[in-house]
Image (cartoon, rainbow, N blue to C red):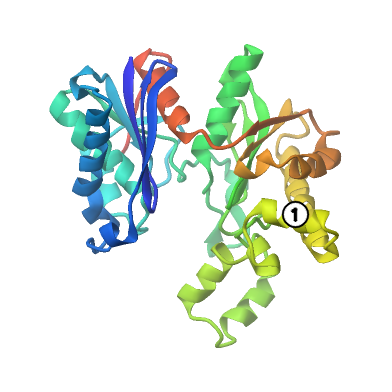
């Protein structure tokens, strides 16, 4: 099975062709600010980015007619259950009219544009809006506000599948805590293969390299009415300029750890505080599974740093063994999600 994988980012488009589990090639196309400035919004970039993908295929001498499917990164959609979705007209409409102007919305659109003329399926898989919450997890503490499921679904599920395969177990039998450590942090308890809770990486849980995490609510109200920030500025402060950036003016963990090794006591305090908060959230999610946790999986770019892993491990390994799958293999995860459908191991889902 040959699968074209498309993962649009804000200034790049990552492309790969897989033959079964093996990549034939992978490339990342950089889009300059000058190129992107020609477009009023992300949706207008569709034809431009599609043309760039087709150029990559041509440069590798790959005939699109040899493809069995095209899969794109899932965008900002309505809450849906986890899995691989066939791109239909309703899904296309919601991607094109999403209230959030995010590059991932282009994944399914471009996948469909390429696949449809070839008569092959177009898919998306495990977007950030996957919602498998149990009812208890939705209660916030204020009737007007419901807790939402928003997480790094693709990487979390991909690594849970990886663990299941390595252990020779069914995904649906697993109870795990999967921790995505990146610019944002998602900590998800997986109960019998379903993500039944998670800290919303934009609004709660531990602070991260660039997000503030859960904050004292009264202080947030006071900050909102202080006159120092517009609504847009305050949201940016919490989601783009919080965490390590707020304390140490960097979101690069290597820079933080360099400061720590050089004897910077304040940097050491902030580094340990982040790991402390991550560990607390893992402990909280262990209660969701009533202590029945087979493994704690650390993944994402930050988990490449052994110091981070060890600081977390020493606080949580009494709960369950700590497994580390560093990095974000989004292209591979998308390819494998499509492959499971093509092989009949999973049924494709319909977006309604």
Q: Is residue 218 left or right of residue 101?
A: right
Kindly identify the residue that appears in the image at 35 percent across and 58 percent down.
Answer: 101
Quadrant where the image shows the C terminus: top left
Can residue 90 be seen?
no
The residue shown at (33%, 60%) is: 33
Q: Quadrant of residue 175?
A: top right
Q: Is residue 154 visible to the viewer in this orientation of the structure?
A: yes
Q: Residue at image x 30%, y 39%? A: 108
Residue 247 image-quadrant placement: bottom right
Q: Is residue 195 above or below residue 192?
A: below
Of residues 287 and 333, the one drawn nearer to the viewer in this rendering? 333
Q: In the rendered view, would you say 169 is above or below 55? A: above
Residue extending farthest to the left is 117
Count of numbered badges drawn on the protein: 1
Q: In the drawing, does residue 295 fall left or right of residue 198?
A: right
The residue that label 1 is drawn on is: 258
Would you place residue 52 above or below residue 204 in this image?
above
Q: Position of residue 165 (x, y in %)?
A: 59, 16
Category of crowding for the residue at label 1, using alpha-carbon neighbours closer than 10 angstroms: few (below 14), some (14–19), many (at least 20): few
Under tag 1, what secondary structure?
A: helix
On screen, residue 281 above or below 322: below
Apparent side of residue 2 relative to residue 39 in the rendered image (left or right): right
Q: Quadrant of the N terminus?
A: top left
Residue 351: x and y, percent? 32, 36
Specify whether 148 is left or right of 189: left
Q: Residue at x 33, y 51 (%)?
A: 31
Given the current orientation, which residue lies at the most extreme bottom position? Answer: 227
Q: In the rendering, at what x and y percent does residue 150 appear?
A: 51, 49
Q: Looking at the picture, tell me which residue is in the foreground, 152 or 349.
A: 152
Q: Position of residue 227 (x, y in %)?
A: 55, 88
């Amino acid at each position: 099975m040959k699968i074209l994988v498309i993962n649009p980012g804000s200034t790049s488009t990552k492309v790969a062709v897989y033959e079964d589990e093996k990549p034939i090639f992978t490339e990342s196309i950089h889009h300059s600010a000058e190129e992107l400035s020609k477009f009023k919004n992300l949706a207008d970039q569709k034809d431009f980015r599609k043309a760039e993908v087709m150029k990559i295929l041509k440069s590798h001498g790959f005939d699109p007619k040899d493809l069995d499917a095209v899969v794109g990164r899932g965008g900002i959609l309505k809450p849906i259950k986890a899995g691989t979705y066939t791109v239909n007209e309703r899904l296309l409409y919601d991607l094109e009219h999403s209230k959030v102007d995010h590059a991932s919305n282009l994944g399914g659109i471009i996948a469909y544009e390429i696949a449809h003329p070839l008569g092959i399926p177009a898919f998306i898989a495990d977007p950030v809006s996957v919602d498998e919450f149990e009812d208890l997890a939705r209660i916030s503490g204020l009737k007007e506000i419901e807790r939402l499921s928003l997480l790094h679904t693709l990487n979390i599920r991909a690594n849970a599948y990886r663990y299941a395969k390595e252990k020779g177990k069914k995904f649906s039998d697993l109870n795990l805590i999967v921790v995505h450590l990146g610019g944002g942090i998602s900590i998800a308890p997986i109960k019998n293969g379903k993500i039944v809770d998670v800290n919303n990486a934009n609004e709660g849980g531990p602070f991260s390299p660039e997000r503030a995490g859960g904050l004292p609510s009264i202080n947030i109200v006071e900050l909102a009415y202080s006159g120092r920030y517009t609504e847009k500025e305050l949201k940016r402060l919490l989601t783009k300029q919080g965490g390590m950036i707020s304390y140490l003016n960097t979101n690069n963990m290597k820079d933080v750890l360099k400061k720590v090794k050089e004897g910077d006591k304040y940097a050491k305090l902030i580094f340990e505080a982040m790991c402390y908060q991550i560990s607390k959230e893992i402990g909280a999610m262990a209660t969701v599974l009533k202590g029945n946790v087979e493994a704690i999986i650390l993944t994402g770019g930050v988990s490449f740093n052994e110091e981070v892993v060890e600081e977390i491990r020493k606080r949580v390994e009494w709960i369950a063994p700590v497994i580390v799958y560093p990095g974000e293999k989004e292209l591979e995860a998308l390819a494998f999600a499509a492959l499971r459908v093509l092989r009949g191991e999973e049924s494709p889902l319909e977006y309604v």
